[in-house]
Each structure stands twice: as C-alpha cells, then as structure tokens.
Image: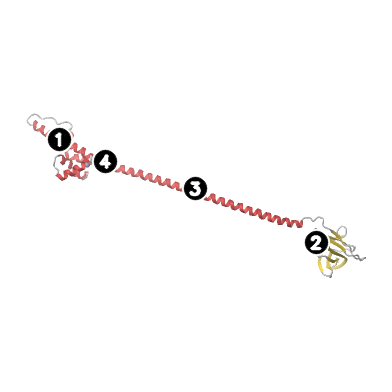
Amino acid sequence: MNHEYINQFNLIDRYVLGKLGADEAQEFEKHFIDCPECVEQLQVTRSFVGDLKELAIQETLVSSNKPTPLPRRWELGQLVPRRSWAAIAFGCLVLAGVFGFFGVRRLNRLEGELRQAREETSAINQQYQRGLETAAASEKEHQEAKQQLTQRLEELEKKLKTEGATNQSVRGSDAPDVNFPIFALVSIRGQAPSPVEITLSASNSRFALSIPVEDTRVFTTYRVTINDYQAKTVWQRDGFRPDAYHSLSLSLKSSFLLPGNYDLKVEGLTSNQWNTVGNYPFRIARRR
Ligand SMILES: [Zn+2]
C-alpha cells in the first residue's frame, strides 16, 4: 500500500469514518504505523471528524434555541471542501517529491563532480608518475651517453699515447745522431793506397763518408757508385755537389753494408757524359 493508493481512495478519511473493510483497514494500519505523514493526516482528519460531530450535536441543540457562531478555526475548514484536504496532502507530497528529486539530482551532480575530481587527480598523478619515469629514463640516457663519451675519451687517449710512442720512434730516426763516425776516403789517383778501414761498433747506427774531390774540372753534378769486391754495384746515386772543402759527403746506415771490401767511384757529369773523377776503396769491419 502506498500514498498514491491511500490518497486516490481517501483511505484516511474512510478509516476515520470506519468505512474501510477489515482487510483494507488492517493493511492501512500496517502502513501508517511506520508512516509519520499518514499518522499526522490521520490525527488531523480525526479531530476534523470529531469537530464535525460536535458541530452536528451543537446544531441539533441550537435548532431549538439560537444559532451559535462556528468555531473560528473551522472557517477555513468550511471554505475548503473535505475532498481538497486529500488534494493538498497530495500536493505537499508532490512538492516533497520534487524537492527530493532535486536533492537527489544535486547529490548525483556533487557525486559526479567528486568522481571527476578524483579521476583528474588520478590522471595528474599518472602524468606525474610518467614524468618521473621519463626523467629517470632521460637521466639514465644521459648517464649512458656520458659513460660512452668517457670510454671514447679513454680510448682516444690510449690511441694517442700509442701513436705518440710510434711518432716518437719515427722522430727517433729523425732525431740527431750523435757521435756517429765520419771516415775520410782517399782517392787512389796518383798513388795506390790501401783501402780505408771503416770499423763500426754495435753502438754506431750510422756512419758518414767524406769524399774529397781532387779533380779541378767543373761538373754540374756528381754521381757516386759503390761496388762490392765482385765489382757488383750495390748502390748508386747522382745529384752530389761538393761542399766548401770540395768534398762530397754521404751518410749510411751501419747495417747497409756487410763487412768486406768495396770500391766507391765518383763521376762528374759534363754534356750528358759521366767522367770518372776518382776511385776510393774502403773495407767495412765490425768491432766485436
Ligand atoms: Zn503513509
């Protein structure tokens, strides 16, 4: 049983007037026990009915005497038909329903806003977390790049050191040779001297030969040829020019010539012809 049914069939009025069937009355009682609205309505109707009865008695009494004015508070009751009380109650109910509806709607809206706020917070949190992760990732990348760079620098440094060492050894060969022996050769023109002894020790990596040019003819350039004891040419080079002392000079690696007898020949160039200037025999020996 609900209020719509109660109002539609004027159950409250009929209950007060004792016009409900036993079943209907019982059901209505079951409802209004838990319904303060119906209880209040019931009380209003009861007192209304009570007043009506009283009025009826008074009217019966007065009919023989003089008319009595109606109680003031029932002036409204008389203006408003009994049927309208139910309508007013129904209107109140509707109003309550409307307020209830808007209340629920407002609550729903607030709940929606709260949910949205929670979602936004969660989204911001996620974004923050992602930001943290990205920062961590880029920091890691940075660290890796740094490490790679450091490694590369170390490799370059190592390479430089190795190359430096290599360069030093290259420069070593370019570096000045000190204390290398210089041997002055003697031409066999005129006399027949014994070969010049060239004794090299293990510490002599190089040696030099000084070759005096005794020929007074003028040559544009000189050529030096070294033949071994079998008269086989082991080395030949042109482009020699005499120095201030009228000597040619030649520097050789000690390992260039094996121990033994050699003949060094000097020739001068005149009009496309090589002319012998002198022969300079020498012997290479190793000091043990
Ligand atoms: Zn009720």
Please tell me which residue is depicted at 40% across the width and 45% down the height of the picture: 118
Residue 131, above or below 66 = below
CB contact under 8 Å: marks 2 and 3? no
Q: Amino acid at mark 2?
A: Ser
CB contact under 8 Å: marks 2 and 1? no
Q: Nearer the viewer, residue 129 or 57?
A: 129
Q: Amino acid at mark 3?
A: Leu
Q: Residue furthest top?
A: 66
Q: SS class of the residue under badge 3? A: helix
Spatial distance from mark 3 to mark 1, Cα to Cα? 79 Å
Spatial distance from mark 2 to mark 1, Cα to Cα? 152 Å
First in sequence: mark 4 vs mark 2: 4
Give the residue pinned by disc 3.
Answer: 132
Give the residue pinned by disc 4.
Answer: 96
Give the residue pinned by disc 1.
Answer: 50
Spatial distance from mark 2 to mark 3, Cα to Cα? 73 Å
Q: Position of residue 193 (x, y in %)?
A: 91, 65
Q: SS class of the residue under badge 4? A: helix
Give the quadrant of ligand 1. Answer: top left
Q: Nearer the viewer, mark 2 or mark 3?
A: 2
Residue 221 visible to an observer of this rendering = no
Q: Nearer the viewer, mark 2 or mark 1?
A: 2
Q: Residues within 10 Å of mark 1 (few under 14, many from 20)?
A: few
CB contact under 8 Å: marks 3 and 1? no
Q: Amino acid at mark 4?
A: Ala
Q: Residues within 10 Å of mark 3 (few under 14, many from 20)?
A: few
Q: How many numbered callouts? A: 4
Q: Nearer the viewer, residue 171 or 262?
A: 262
First in sequence: mark 2 vs mark 3: 3
Q: Amino acid at mark 1?
A: Gly
Give the residue pinned by disc 2.
Answer: 254
